[in-house]
Amino acid sequence: MAKSVDPEKPGRIKQLRMIAQVIQQANPKGLPIVFLSAIGTLAVVVVIGLVTGFLWYSVFLGVLLGLTVGLVVFGQLAQRAQYSILHGQTGAGAAVLQGMRGNWQVTPAIAVNRDQDLVHMVVGFPGVVLVSEGPGNRVARMLAAEKKRVARVVLGVEIYDIQCGDGEGQVPLAKLQRHIMKLPRNLKKPAVNEVKDRLRSLPKNVPMPKGPMPKGVRMPRGPKMR
């Protein structure tokens, strides 16, 4: 039986073109850097082949290495471009958190104030992680209130609070995934699932922030916590 094809899901070539457009928009020099890195790698390997006498072998190897280096540079530039597009948008932190790989449960905007500052909740092997978006002098009280509210449900579970932003003591958006992935593993998988079940009893009567949350931006998947 033929598999059904989702008409809204772009193909691989179309995805690459879309990502290339994002890179071009964020950094006009990005795509030339990708091509130069690939061609430069090929040229270096070919020169080595000429010197050592293995020209045809070096051409084959150089093409493979050139493509690999080009794709790596392309991926790094795409990641930077995506972060630059999200930066400053309401809910940017949630978009980054939802791009994490592994046994993570992300609940965006569990708290919102009138200034559109947000607090998101992440549940995983470290325990519960509360992540705020907004100036430090405004979100500190929000984080404290949510930490107290969550603690009533998940007794004995470690609760971390992180301020995402560009202010002093805050974690930049581009480093948020990495920062959370470095937190210690305090729970086993069954305990993580139990915490998720407990948190379902929390009331969900928080108004959503004004304006659209970031959509259509495919965040790069971070490393998977083992």
Image (cartoon, grey):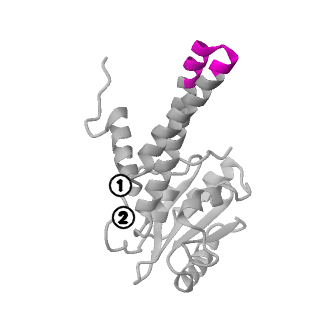
Residue beneath the point at 57% across and 24% down: 62
What is the total number of numbered labels drawn onto the structure image?
Answer: 2
Query: How many other residues sit within 10 Å of disc 2, few (<14), some (14-19) or many (≥20)?
Result: some
> What is the three-letter code of the residue carrying label 2?
Met
**Image side of residue 3 versus residue 136, left or right:** left
Residue 177 image offset from top left, x and y in percent: 58, 57
**Residue under numbered circle 2:** 213
Placement of 110 over or under 27, stated as above or below = below
Foreground disc of the pair 1, 2: 1
**Residue at the image point whose x is 46% and y is 38% from the top:** 35
- Residue 54 magenta-highlighted: yes
Place of residue 139 in the rendered image (x, y in percent of width and height, measured from the top left): 54, 81
- What kind of element bears circle 1? helix
Residue placed under numbered mark 1 in the picture: 25
Q: How crowded is mark 1: few (under 14 residues within 10 Å), some or many (20 or more)?
A: few
Magenta region: 49-62
Quarter of the image where one finds residue 72? top right
Q: Looking at the image, which residue is at 62% across and 45% down?
A: 224
